[in-house]
Amino acid sequence: MPAERPTPTPTPRSKPPPPVRMLRAGEVLHLTRAASPQFVTPMRVRVIRELVDRFPPYGWLWFEGYQLDAKGRAVAKRELFVLREGLEWVVTAPPPARPAPARRPPARPRTAVG
């Protein structure tokens, strides 16, 4: 009688790499130590552009951005080297729409009576 073959156990498959999200101008990032050891004090940065002409190690990137203060105003322009996995995108409200200027009714020509 032939010996039964054991059923092969499924091997764990490696997960596919997560999709790479490119930085876009205007996005706001919250940078902490997860992004780089240099961010002992976290900061917020508005992206100007990703610097694709540099060749960082896999998973890292260079980008230009404006460091923001507590009110969201740019205080310094910086070039930053960060770990892509450590980036935290900040969801910001769109800028308020400008109210439409008040419209006046068209001027009517005066007619002389009499």
Image: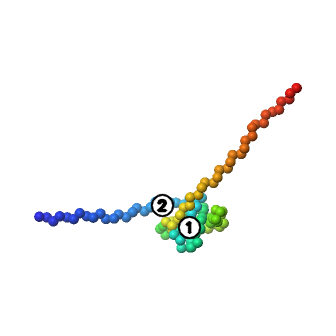
Q: For numbered disc 2, what is the local secondary structure?
A: loop
What residue is pinned by disc 1?
31
Specify the farthest residue to the right.
114
| Position of residue 114 in the picture relative to residue 104 (left or right) | right
Residue 19 % position (x, y): 46, 60
Please name the amino acid that badge 2 sits on.
Val
- Residue 68's mark? none
Residue 108 in view in this figure: yes
Q: For numbered disc 1, what is the local secondary structure?
A: strand
Please name the amino acid that badge 1 sits on.
Leu
Where residue 78 sits, quadrant-wise, is bottom right
Pointer 1 with pointer 2, Cβ within 8 A: no
| Position of residue 29 in the picture relative to residue 58 (left or right) | right
Residue 102 % position (x, y): 72, 44
What residue is pinned by disc 2?
20
Where residue 47 sits, quadrant-wise, is bottom right
Residue at image coords 64%, 52%: 96
Residue 67 % position (x, y): 62, 66
| Position of residue 11 in the picture relative to residue 62 (left or right) | left
Above or below, 104 relative to 17: above
Specify the farthest residue to the left.
1
Query: If you read the primary sequence from the N terminus, does the residue marked by circle 1 or circle 2 appear first?
Result: 2
Above or below, 108 relative to 38: above
Q: Residues within 10 Å of mark 1 (few under 14, many from 20)?
A: many
Residue 25 in view in this figure: no
Q: How crowded is mark 2: few (under 14 residues within 10 Å), some or many (20 or more)?
A: few
Where residue 38 sits, quadrant-wise, is bottom right
Q: Which of 72 and 64 is in front in this view?
A: 72
Residue at image coords 40%, 61%: 16
Q: Nearer the viewer, residue 63 or 12?
A: 12
Of the 4 image quadrants, the one containing the C terminus is top right
